[in-house]
Image: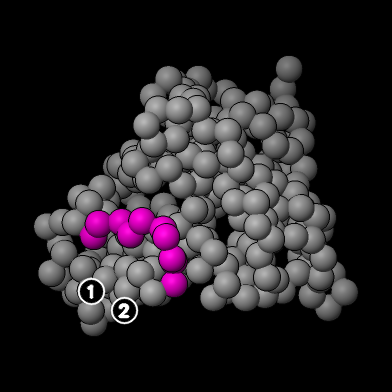
Amino acid sequence: MNALADLAERPVDWTDHAMVSSKAPGGDEAEAEAIVIEGLSKKFGGVYAVQNVSLHCRVGEVVGLIGPNGAGKTTLMNLISGVLTPDSGTVHLSGKQLKAGSPENCARGGIARTFQNIRLFKRLTVRQNIEVAQVTSKNNRDGRKVHDIDEILSLLDLHSMAELKAGTLPYGHQRRVEIARALALSPHVVLLDEPAAGMNEQESKALIGSVQAIRDRFGCGVIVIDHDLRFIMEVSERIYVMHLGEVIVSGLPHEVRHDERVIEVYLGRKASN
């Protein structure tokens, strides 16, 4: 929790990070909405885990999603990706409404995701893990360009490890393999659930460049959850803040980090004037 206080009091150089304009491949300004979530709600035992949440992510944009433990972030990810069925609300991907509660339909439509807990095929090599996803993409994504595996490996600095078994890699590199596998689905939108978890400062900093390279090279929208606030502030172009299942603040990174409601939720105190 001290991270937010640190961010609020220390200047951050935004020039090389989130404040650059999002661009679609070819340099045109990205205006199209990759994904639009409207009014998503989900109850468990009569208690709202997610309540009337709306957000959007444009093509070629990195959007951050933060909030304290229990805010509903991962539940929201599960609703967007079809793992859970919402009680109400809709998800539109590239203008088409997705069938609620259908992970297969969401994946075929163009949503790929990673999970808090790594879910690799640990006895397969790094390349084989990515090939599995690529085959799925070829079989189910009619008309969608299939990303080249070697390009994905290079983008995520995994080429030298391509023939190693995924389960033998350090934790941070396994995280990268998960992202690579998600990219092999040729998605319109990538959902990254705590991609910097378990990484040291150097690895987290390198991951910022990788996520932004994904945005620039493949032109997909990226929605990122992470508890590393400095990582989120630097990688994201816009940020949504959740608390008790609701979005309480949204805006540019420098706006969010100075918002009194955000500081109070994280630190239990009012922002200093």
Decide which of 29, 247 is in the foreground and name it: 29
Of labels 2 and 1, earlier in sequence is: 2
Indicate whether 214 appears above or below 40.
above
What is the distance, in whole Å, between disc 2 and disc 1 at their CAs? 9 Å
Residue placed under numbered mark 2 in the picture:
121
**Kind of residue at disc 2:** Phe
Q: Is there any visible trace of residue 219 in the rendered image?
A: yes
User: In the figure, is residue 226 to the left or right of 203?
Assistant: right
Q: For the residues labelled 2 and 1, say whether their Cβ atoms are less than 8 Å apart.
A: yes
Q: Position of residue 170 (x, y in %)?
A: 25, 64
144 falls in the magenta region? yes
| Range of magenta residues | 140-149
Residue for point 50% across, 69% down: 108
Which residue occupies the extreme right position in the image?
A: 46
Q: Residues within 10 Å of mark 2 (few under 14, many from 20)?
A: some
User: In the figure, is residue 202 to the left or right of 116?
Assistant: left
Residue for point 30% across, 63% down: 177
Indicate whether 18 appears above or below 84.
above
6 falls in the magenta region? no
Q: Position of residue 242 (x, y in %)?
A: 71, 49
Please identify the quadrant where the N terminus is shown. top right
Residue for point 75% across, 60% down: 90
Residue placed under numbered mark 1 in the picture:
128
**Kind of residue at disc 1:** Gln
Indicate whether 261 appears above or below 15.
below
Q: Is there any visible trace of residue 74 in the rendered image?
A: no
Mark nearest the camera among 2 and 1 is 1
| Disc 1 secondary structure class | helix
Q: Main secondary structure of the magenta part?
A: loop
